[in-house]
Amino acid sequence: MSPEKLVRMANQIATFFRSQPGTDQAARLAGHLRDYWDPSMRATLKAHVADGAEDIDPIVRDAAAQL
């Protein structure tokens, strides 16, 4: 799966978690990604974040750091 598609999916999930109460949205997103994304998807997302991609929601950046 392309990094752009994974970012789009992760950004959509982050939108959901942003609407939830609390301050642990990134941790909950990281948990969701661990539970539902396979290791290669997570690795691709992390690499894209590490490459400095600018199309990533801040919650996704924080979640990727927790993976």
Image: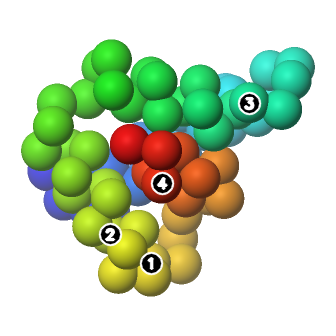
Q: Residue at x 44, y 22 (%)?
A: 32
Q: Is residue 43 left or right of 27 when viewed as pictured?
A: left
Q: Which residue is mark 1?
A: 53
The reply to whether the C-beta atoms of the residues labelled 2 and 1 are less than 8 Å apart is yes
Residue 48 image point, x, y percent: 32, 69
Q: Amino acid at mark 2?
A: His
Q: Nearer the viewer, mark 1 or mark 3?
A: 3
Quick check: can you spot residue 55? yes
Q: Residue at x 27, y 67 (%)?
A: 47
Label 2 CA crowd tier, 10 Å (few <14, some 14–19, many 20+): many
Q: Nearer the viewer, mark 4 or mark 2?
A: 4
| Number of the label disc, if any, that sits on residue 24 | 3
Q: CA distance from mark 1 to mark 4?
A: 14 Å
Q: Is residue 59 left or right of 24 when viewed as pictured?
A: left
Q: Earlier in the sequence, mark 4 or mark 2?
A: 2
| Number of the label disc, if any, that sits on residue 48 | 2
Figure quadrant of residue 18: top right
Quick check: can you spot residue 5? no
Q: CA distance from mark 3 to mark 2?
A: 23 Å
Q: CA distance from mark 1 to mark 3?
A: 23 Å
Q: Amino acid at mark 1?
A: Ala
Q: Secondary structure at mark 2?
A: helix
Q: Amino acid at mark 3?
A: Asp
Q: Is residue 21 above or below residue 42?
A: above
Q: Earlier in the sequence, mark 4 or mark 3?
A: 3
The reply to whether the C-beta atoms of the residues labelled 4 and 2 are less than 8 Å apart is no
Q: CA distance from mark 2 to mark 1?
A: 6 Å
Q: Secondary structure at mark 3?
A: loop
Residue 15 image point, x, y percent: 67, 37
Label 3 CA crowd tier, 10 Å (few <14, some 14–19, many 20+): some
